[in-house]
Image (cartoon, helix red, strand yellow):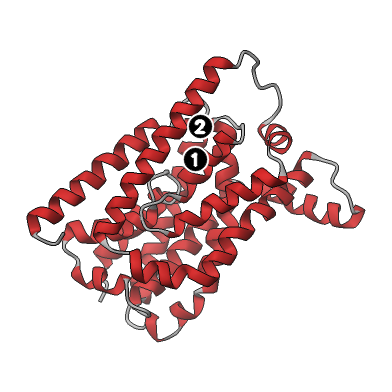
Amino acid sequence: MLTYFQAIVIGLVQGVTELFPISSLGHSVIIPYLFGWHNIIKSQTSSESFFLAFLVALHVATATALIIFYRKEWVKLIKAFFSSIKNRRIHTSYERLIWLLIIATIPAGLTGLLLEHVLRTQFAKPLAAAVFLFINGLILITGDNYARKRSNQEKDFKMDSTVAHTAKTITPQKAGLIGTAQVFALLAGISRSGITMVSGIYSGLDYEDSARFSFLLATPVIMAAGLYKIPDLVGPNGNGVRGQVIAGAIVTAFAAYFSVKYLDKYFKGKSLRPFGIYCLTISTIVICVGLIRGHF
């Protein structure tokens, strides 16, 4: 079963890696492998297991932390949603932004419902996670190179607020493409925040705006994924691990809150490159460990 130490460690990793662009799903596979937690490794590719119930709580905790941090934005976005429905038109930046988020949420939501189980059981394995994490590193570095090149070419400075600039820059078509890119985060090793940030950068956003759009977009997707799997937590799969689930979820919530607080400031002047280098390094280490152990 799941020990309290394992729950706390994985909860901490989940809270950080879900928002840092380094793949929480990939780390939920890699960390148990490196630590030799064979009970968790085996449960990850099972159709039903205690670890699935555990991940449900961690996803809900992460989404809750995001909602709390961006509570002012979400209040405005929810009001904007109902005002746009009432007036049957989109007039303000918040009204446009909420519909862009809805459009971008659809691809990942539908794909998750249809393919999450298949992708998890087939690819939530150490070697696959390491390979996809390496690919994730390349994606981040490529996006960073593009952002640097574009920044050197542009002479004008952004004068609008983050919301106004995002609402003007992202078209519904671009929102759909960003949402489609998010689908690849169903593969362990591909970061949800990372791939949506890079997609946002290629759509014309800077680091700050692409990060903010990514975090807002992640909130409903992560929360929906958690709530959809609640039966796993309250059902037989949760038996014997509910105490560990609570401990892990609490750690995840705090880790996610402070992670997004840090990243919200970080991306006002920093880049994706360090995260790309980290992914390349960790994936290489995992592959080397696997070769030494004779597992790959």
Q: Which residue is identified by label 2?
A: 265
Decide if residue 282 is on the left or right side of residue 139. left
The residue depicted at 39 percent of the width and 33 percent of the height is 141
Q: Nearer the viewer, residue 267 or 3?
A: 267
Pick out the residue farthest to the right: 87
Query: Which numbered tag is attached to residue 204?
Result: none
Query: Callout 1: helix, strand or loop?
Result: helix
Vertically, is 18 above or below 57?
Answer: above
Q: Which mark is residue 261?
A: 1
Q: Are marks 1 and 2 in contact (CB under 8 Å)?
A: yes
* Image point (39%, 51%), residue name: 23
Q: Amino acid at mark 1?
A: Lys
The residue furthest top is 155
- Indicate the quadrant where residue 134 lies: top left
Where is residue 73 shown, x and y percent of the image? 67, 45
Left or right of residue 54: residue 195: right
From this viewpoint, is residue 9 visible?
A: no
Residue 52, x across and y down, in percent: 39, 72
Point 25% across, 73% down: residue? 42
Give the x, y percent position of residue 228.
54, 73
Which amino acid type is marked by label 2? Lys
